[in-house]
Amino acid sequence: MFRKLSVEFLGTFWLVLGGCGSAVLAAAFPEVGIGLLGVSFAFGLTVLTMAYAVGGISGGHFNPAVSLGLAVVGRVPPASLVGYIIAQVAGAIAAAAVLYVIATGKADFQLGSCAANGYGEHSPGGYSLTAALVTEVVMTAFFLFIILGSTHSRVPVGFAPIAIGLGLTLIHLVSIPVTNTSVNPARSTGQALFVGDWAISQLWLFWVAPLIGAVIAGIAWKVVGEEA
């Protein structure tokens, strides 16, 4: 279990550092910034690379919602769930701390949203609470459905990280304008702690909605995906 929790910490660390780091450091870099497309691919690539690197040890969740969804379908023992979530949140917070140290090394750095998730006036596109809630529930549900399907025993071995990484890329392409894309309570928590204020007060949504989406996906998979 120590090995599993250690790589969940490291995998979540890499997801937050790579994904949020691309948004904070590289998205709007003058003339050569990677933009929304680049940030979306960065998030997808973090999951793809770490799923190949350590997925064979822990399952490569890197996300409390993923762990919950897998528990719903019986692929993760309920007794392991709390440990996984603690390791993931710790990894996200550690990555957010490293990113903060790097970002504040720029003389004219302004904290801004620092890739935190938000709705209403803190949504990148000004989307409402309802829009943010629906987006996060639906996107997380489909993300879990992709994970459950691509890791099933009837699917050729070795390709799941590609489907999962591209799935997360697509999710970001759709939903960054709405919430800055969470679908991952750990990722949201790390950034919110360093932004503080509004990010903390809105953090509840980015726990509740992804977890609801994960449960919906787990139930749906048991109905249509599992063999009798």
Image (cartoon, grey):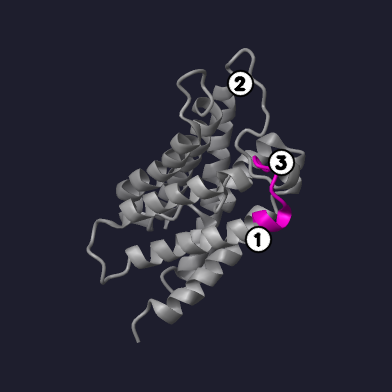
Residues at marks 3 and 2 touching, judged by CB atoms closer than 8 Å: no
Residue 202 falls left or right of residue 10: right
> Gap in Å between the C-alphas at discs 3 and 2?
21 Å
Query: Label 1, on which residue?
Result: 208
Whether residue 69 appears in this view of the structure is yes
Q: Residue 142 magenta-drawn?
A: no
Residue at (62, 12) in percent of width and height: 107
At label 3, which amino acid type do we have?
His
Residues at marks 3 and 1 touching, judged by CB atoms closer than 8 Å: no
Circle 3: element type? helix
Labels 3 and 2: the sequence-earlier one: 2
- Magenta part of the protein: which range? 123-132
Which residue appears farthest toward the top when viewing the image? Answer: 107
| Residue 218 point in image, percent of width and height | 48, 72
Check residue 15 in the rendering and tell me which mark sits there, or answer none: none
Q: Residue 128 magenta-drawn?
A: yes
Residue at (51, 32) in percent of width and height: 21
Residue at (52, 49) in percent of width and height: 174
| Residue 36 point in image, percent of width and height | 50, 36
Nearer the viewer's eye, disc 3 or disc 2? 3
| Residue 208 point in image, percent of width and height | 65, 60
Labels 2 and 1: the sequence-earlier one: 2
Check residue 104 in the rendering and tell me which mark sits there, or answer none: 2
Query: Label 3, on which residue?
Result: 122
Say few, some or many: other residues with alpha carbon within 10 Å of mark 1 (under 14 / 14 to 19 / 20 or more).
some
> Gap in Å between the C-alphas at discs 2 and 1?
31 Å
